Image (tube, rainbow, N blue to C red):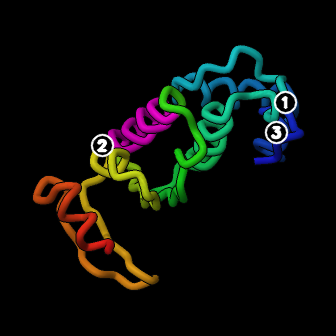
């Protein structure tokens, strides 16, 4: 995400400006990302909108898997909820998400499996429905 550029800038290099804007607006609408003006520069968006925009750009290429590294780390509660909702919508669409985060609440809201790492090594793998936060915390430390 280039924070000094417009939302539609460089979204699809091969498309002309009008086509780029239409495609960006279509994707933002489909993902329910509420940005009033598609010509606004990305650095003028809230943290949650910037994160949603980055995620939207990633899924615009119809990936099977998206890797997200701390997508809610610097966001306020309301922005975090919007990003979590976006992740859940991708999940409903069959897009696999690898979520790297330290926020256990986020993990339990969106994941099916939890891979616990400690010092870069896998400690355990748990089905989310078969574990709880206390067990995961014990595995982490």
Q: Position of residue 62 (x, y in %)?
A: 53, 49
Q: Quadrant of the C terminus?
A: bottom left
The Cα–Cα distance between marks 3 and 1, rounded to whole angstroms, is 19 Å
Mark toward the start of the polypeptide (2 vs 1): 1
**Extreme-top residue of the structure:** 36
Decide: is 73 above or below 8.
below
Magenta part of the protein: which range?
A: 80-93
Predominant SS of the magenta segment: helix
Asked whether 49 or 24 is in front, the reply is 49
The Cα–Cα distance between marks 3 and 2, rounded to whole angstroms, is 37 Å
Q: Position of residue 123 (x, y in %)?
A: 29, 81
How many residues crowd mark 3 within 10 Å: few (<14), some (14–19), many (20+)?
A: few
- Determine which residue is flagged by label 2: 109
Q: Secondary structure at mark 2?
A: helix
Which residue is painted at 30% across and 43% down in the image? 109
Answer with left or right where residue 105 lies relative to residue 77. Answer: left
Give residue 11's quadrant in the image. top right
- Check residue 15 in the rendering and tell me which mark sits there, or answer none: 3
* Magenta residue check for 89: yes
- Check residue 41 in the rendering and tell me which mark sits there, or answer none: 1
Mark toward the start of the polypeptide (3 vs 1): 3
Which residue is painted at 60% across and 31% down in the image? 27
Examine the rendering and report whether any part of residue 102 can be seen: yes
Answer with left or right where residue 63 lies relative to residue 105. Answer: right
């Amino acid at each position: 995400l280039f924070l000094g550029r417009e939302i539609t800038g460089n979204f699809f290099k091969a498309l002309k400006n009008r086509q780029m804007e239409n495609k960006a607006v279509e994707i933002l609408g489909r993902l329910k990302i509420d940005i009033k003006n598609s010509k606004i520069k990305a650095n003028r968006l809230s943290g949650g909108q910037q994160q949603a925009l980055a995620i939207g750009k990633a899924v615009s290429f119809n990936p099977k898997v998206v890797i997200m590294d701390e997508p809610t780390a610097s966001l306020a509660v309301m922005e975090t909820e919007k990003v979590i909702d976006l992740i859940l919508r991708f999940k409903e669409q069959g897009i696999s998400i690898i979520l790297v985060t330290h926020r256990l609440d986020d993990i339990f809201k969106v994941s099916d499996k939890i891979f616990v790492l400690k010092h870069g090594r896998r400690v355990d793998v748990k089905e989310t429905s078969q574990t709880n936060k206390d067990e995961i915390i014990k595995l982490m430390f």
